[in-house]
């Protein structure tokens, strides 16, 4: 577990979505971080510049100012560059804060920024799928019902499209998901470490998978029931395979698919997130 001094050099990558969603919170984050450390600010205009900035971080410690999608993007890039194990990430959530808070990042821009300066690195498990995608928090099958309007592309000053929530002024902000309809039931086979938890002949309301502790994923399957609620089926293991007919799934804040088969494995302690010392 590494500790950090406020004299550390930081690379503060401010996601375009954060700048459009809540400019005041971005300003506060910049002020706190710049006052407490040698911070280099980077304002990418899109995913390519975001990736380029992260790749050129040098010895600076990267700090993502943005929502759960921005954090997941940073982890994915570092994972695919095989640099994740040696890089401690920090995040100041702006926009949708649900993912960051579920990982232990404190609420509030000032508290989150102070944790960047004074926190410690915690090693966290990661789910990695067979297409090299990653899951930080949890995945769900089928995707949860969409509670927010779909985002629409808006041009930045450079003319490149980015995205802004149509409901950013509402409080509290709902989780932003792609506009994918969620069926009432799914027929999937779920296997954990090669053992079948539920098969195709049993429709299910939902399947959830999340990184647990010590290299094991937590799996919950809720069978479809009529009348009284059915007892959830619980399992844990290092690999989870789901097979079915063109199913979609939500990984963190992104809906993916359709696919017919996907396997996730647990990468134990695969990434580091700077969190308050008392967490």
Image (cartoon, rainbow, N blue to C red):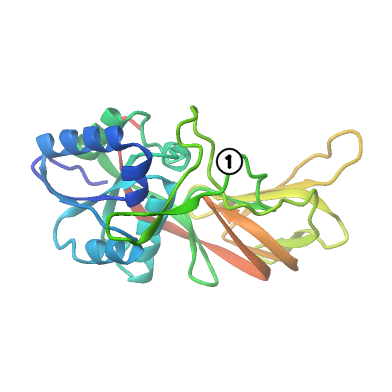
Q: Which residue is drawn at 43% across and 36% down?
A: 101
Q: In which quadrant of the rendered image does the C terminus lie?
A: top left
Q: Which residue is drawn at 28% across and 32% down?
A: 24
**Other-residue count near label 1 (Cα within 10 Å), few / some / many at <14 / 14–19 / ≥20:** some
Q: Which of 153 and 236 is in front in this view?
A: 153
- Can you name the residue that lies furthest to the right here? 227
Secondary structure of the residue carrying tag 1 is loop
Q: Which of 237 and 48 is in front in this view?
A: 48
The answer to whether residue 276 shows anywhere in this view is no
Counting from the top left corner in percent of width and height, residue 136 is at 47, 52
Q: Residue 198 appears in which quarter of the rendering? A: bottom right
Counting from the top left corner in percent of width and height, residue 120 is at 25, 41
Counting from the top left corner in percent of width and height, residue 59 is at 13, 59
Counting from the top left corner in percent of width and height, residue 74 is at 35, 58
Left/right placement of residue 135 relative to residue 235 reads left
Q: Name the residue under label 1.
A: 148
């Amino acid at each position: 577990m590494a500790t950090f001094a406020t004299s550390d050099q930081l690379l503060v990558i401010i996601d375009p979505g954060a700048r459009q969603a809540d400019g005041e919170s971005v300003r506060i984050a910049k002020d706190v971080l710049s006052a407490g450390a040698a911070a280099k600010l980077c304002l990418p205009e899109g995913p390519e510049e975001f990736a380029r900035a992260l790749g050129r971080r040098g010895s600076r410690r990267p700090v993502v100012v943005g929502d759960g999608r921005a954090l997941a993007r940073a982890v994915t890039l570092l994972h695919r560059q095989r640099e994740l194990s040696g890089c401690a990430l920090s995040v100041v959530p702006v926009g949708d804060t649900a993912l960051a808070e579920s990982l232990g990042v404190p609420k509030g821009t000032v508290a989150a920024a102070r944790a960047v300066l004074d926190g410690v690195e915690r090693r966290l498990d990661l789910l990695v799928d067979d297409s090299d995608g990653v899951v930080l928090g949890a995945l769900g099958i089928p995707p949860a019902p969409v509670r927010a309007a779909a985002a629409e592309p808006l041009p930045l000053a450079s003319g490149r499209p980015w995205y802004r929530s149509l409901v950013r002024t509402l409080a509290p902000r709902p989780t932003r998901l792609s506009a994918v309809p969620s069926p009432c039931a799914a027929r999937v086979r779920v296997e954990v470490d090669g053992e079948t938890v539920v098969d195709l002949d049993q429709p299910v309301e939902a399947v959830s998978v999340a990184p647990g502790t010590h290299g094991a994923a937590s799996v919950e399957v809720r069978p479809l029931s009529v009348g009284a609620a059915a007892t959830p089926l619980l399992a844990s293991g290092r690999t989870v395979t789901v097979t079915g007919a063109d199913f979609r799934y939500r990984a963190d804040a992104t809906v993916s698919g359709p696919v017919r088969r996907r396997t996730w494995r647990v990468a134990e302690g695969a990434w580091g997130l700077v969190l308050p010392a008392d967490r």
